[in-house]
Image: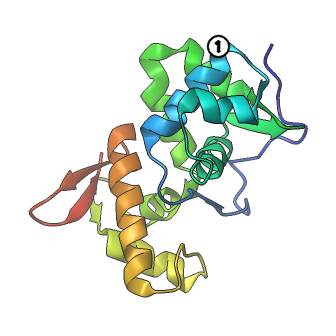
């Protein structure tokens, strides 16, 4: 049985809150989480940790990433698939499209897309600087913040097909 959020996030609103992807979470961890919840909706958080083999220090970030992407939600110590999470699982040929759409409303990807003209490119440093200027950061040290933004951009946006990476030039090209 799939449950939906009591108050769904309006990801299209211009004044929507800035959702941030938690650092250090890999796409494979979130995809495994969604697959697990898809097999048994309403799984206890303790069982999620056990089933994923996730360290208890890593699990909160994985759960937060799933929530930020709108794929899962937590309630009363259990983890449920959202409507988007159900769509994600039911459309195996379109999983990347669903992920791409979800990432487009989450920082740092939202800002990267806003900074990039059609067919253009952007560097992770430009994205980190723009976010830092708006008070959005993962670390107070600029170098560490840039490293986090760069890792998020490479790990998530390339997988989802938002950007390609030009290693020799060190920039992300909008696809």
Seen from the viewer's position, the closer of residues 91 and 67 is 67
95 relative to 5, above or below: above
At which x and y percent is residue 139?
52, 78
The quadrant of the image that shows the C terminus is: top left
Q: Is residue 144 left or right of residue 165?
A: right
Q: Quadrant of residue 46?
A: top right
Residue at 42% over, 67% down: 148
Seen from the viewer's position, the closer of residues 147 and 159 is 147
Residue at 43% over, 81% down: 129
14 relative to 163, above or below: below
1 relative to 174, above or below: above
Seen from the viewer's position, the closer of residues 46 and 108 is 46
87 relative to 29, above or below: above
SS for callout 1: helix
Crowd band around label 1 with a 10 angstrom C-alpha radius: few (<14), some (14–19), many (20+): few
Seen from the viewer's position, the closer of residues 16 and 87 is 87
Residue at 56% over, 46% down: 55
At which x and y percent is residue 171?
23, 64
The quadrant of the image that shows the N terminus is: top right
At which x and y percent is residue 97?
46, 30
Residue at 68% over, 48% down: 12
Q: Which residue is mark 1?
A: 39
Q: Quadrant of residue 151?
A: bottom left
């Amino acid at each position: 049985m799939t449950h939906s959020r009591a108050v769904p996030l309006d990801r299209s609103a211009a004044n929507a809150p800035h959702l941030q992807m938690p650092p250090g979470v890999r796409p494979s961890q979130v995809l495994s989480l969604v697959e697990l919840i898809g097999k048994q909706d309403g799984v206890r958080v303790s069982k999620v940790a056990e089933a994923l083999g996730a360290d208890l220090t890593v699990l909160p970030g994985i759960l937060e990433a799933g929530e930020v992407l709108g794929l899962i939600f937590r309630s009363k110590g259990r983890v449920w698939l959202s409507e988007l999470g159900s769509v994600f699982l039911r459309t195996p040929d379109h999983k990347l499209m669903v992920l791409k759409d979800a990432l487009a409303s989450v920082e740092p990807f939202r800002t990267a897309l806003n900074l990039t003209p059609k067919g253009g490119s952007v560097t992770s440093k430009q994205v980190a600087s723009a976010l830092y200027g708006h008070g959005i950061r993962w670390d107070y040290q600029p170098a560490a913040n840039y490293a986090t933004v760069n890792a998020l951009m490479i790990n998530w946006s390339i997988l989802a097909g938002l950007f390609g990476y030009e290693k020799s030039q060190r920039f992300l090209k909008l696809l």
